[in-house]
Image: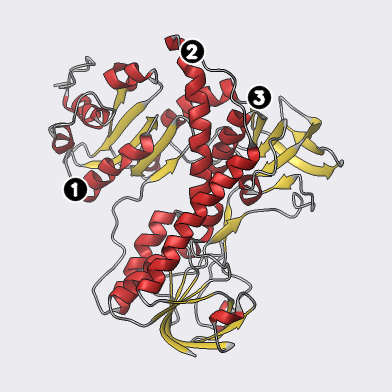
Amino acid sequence: MHSQVVVLGGGPGGYAAAFLAADLGMEVAIVEADPRLGGTCLLRGCIPSKALLHVAKIISEAEEMAEWGVGFSKPSIDINKVRARKESVIEQLSGGLGKLAEARKVKKIHARGVFVNSTTLQLEGGDPSTYDSERLTFDHCILATGSVPAMPKFLDIGSPRVVDSTGALALEDIPERLLVIGGGYIGLEMGTVYSELGSKVTVVEMTDGLLPGADRDLVKPLEKRIRARFEAVHLGHKVAGLKDLGETVEVQIEGPDLSGAVEFDRVLVSIGRWPVSKGFGLENTRAVVNERGFVEVDAQQRTADPHIMAIGDVAGDPMLAHKAAYEGKIAAEVLAGEPAAYDAQAVPAIVFTDPEIAWAGLTADEAKKAGRKVKVSQYPWQASGRAIANGRTDGLTKWIVDPETDRVLGCGIVGAGAGELIAEATLAIEMGCTVRDVAETIHPHPTLSETVAFAGEVHLGTATEVYRPKRK
């Protein structure tokens, strides 16, 4: 069995690469062990978590309407129906991908692919009816194997009460007390879901701040809200060990505020993700894997093996679905002989908590570490008519600007719906816009999108709702 192009992995990067390669006239096969296309993002990550975050948002908004004199009774939660609705979202989207593959004549092989050499995969398990030979040869392979939740051995005690993000999304129950180990975006998103569903959520983070690496100005409003709605947040603390007691998990915590054994009904381990670059014969090829487990690629997604390309999480940070899809399309175009290359000026990142945090391009901290001079221009949402009307003024929009050219280099937003606003900023950075281009683009009123322009006006000294004249 032979295919011109084989895509190993059916996630956002994999199916984007496969579909475009087919559209460009190539014979394509996707090898995916799961019986459904979609990968981690659709089946066990982005999509189901956002579906549950939508539920959490409605619950919190209903509660907040009390300030308007509108009262709702305490929500009745049928966890089985919530789980079923989440699964229906997944099935609808994965089913659609399957039909798109069929329409494009992309062969779907549901099996585990193991490299025998640089041009051959051994097919194992899965659904044997989807392949008629145990060996699949190819001219080129696009590696899109993604990543998995990190689980250190000392935390992997084999208890059903200790879960990673995949287990948390399964919604087995609503624990009375939930410990989230790790204050990164996945832990805070899932903590938000369970908190609104009724769990008392405690977060333990080793560093001195939530969302390590994110802009502190953006994190502050989120941390304030989380501390008000979660049971506790312990920074500068670490978990030394876990013990399954049957009905609970005993957690050994070390830190200045909380130290000793504490019991929780469930524990979510959320300390990052590991690229999937081992266990499927990649050592039988010439592809190079670095010390962090990423497959090394050039700007055209080529590895050191002329027959193999790599995209998405396995090819390096940031581990984001939209970055994987972008790289997948580059790989397909390169194989079609087009002069494609990775040249994105900004990759947006979003934390889908409440409030959301989003950023793109250069951050103030990155500029400082690089010794690069920048101007930072901020617009507080306390001055936004729409934010006030919504009762959500806990937001901020900021631009990072080149002081010599006034070109926008980066943008950060925290607030309700920040994830929907960052796309405009990403486009502005990608297009090389100046801050005046953004500020003088007419934005509809009253909207939160105005804050993107108003933050630019603050830089120019022309903001209407805040008095911060530009210094001469």
Give the quarter of the image for residue 349: top left
Three-letter amino acid code at the position of disc 1 = Gly
**Front disc: 3 or 2:** 2
Task: Give coordinates of residue 194: x percent, y percent.
Answer: 62, 34
Mark 3 to mark 1 CA distance (whole Å) = 44 Å
Q: How many marks?
A: 3
Mark 2 to mark 1 CA distance (whole Å) = 45 Å
State the residue position of label 3: 231
Residue 336 makes an appearance in the image:
yes
State the residue position of label 2: 66
Judge whether 336 appears above or below 358 on screen: below
Judge whether 211 appears above or below 147 on screen: above
Q: What residue appears at the point 87 percent right and 41 percent down from the top-left corner? A: 245
Mark 3 to mark 2 CA distance (whole Å) = 22 Å
Q: Earlier in the sequence, mark 3 or mark 1?
A: 3
> Which element is circle 2 on?
helix
* Front one among 78 and 51: 78
State the residue position of label 1: 432
Q: Dot 1: within a 10 Å radius of its alpha carbon, few (fewer than 14), some, or many (20 or more) residues?
A: some
> Which element is circle 1 on?
loop
Give the quarter of the image for residue 396: top left
Judge whether 350 appears above or below 310 on screen: above
- Extreme residue in the right direction: 245
> Which element is circle 3 on?
loop
Q: Earlier in the sequence, mark 2 or mark 1?
A: 2
Q: What residue appears at the point 55 percent right and 88 percent down from the top-left corner? A: 132
Q: Dot 3: within a 10 Å radius of its alpha carbon, few (fewer than 14), some, or many (20 or more) residues?
A: some
Residue 311 makes an appearance in the image:
no
Three-letter amino acid code at the position of disc 3 = Glu
Task: Give coordinates of residue 411: x percent, y percent.
Answer: 31, 38
Judge whether 44 appears above or below 236 on screen: below
- Extreme residue in the top direction: 69
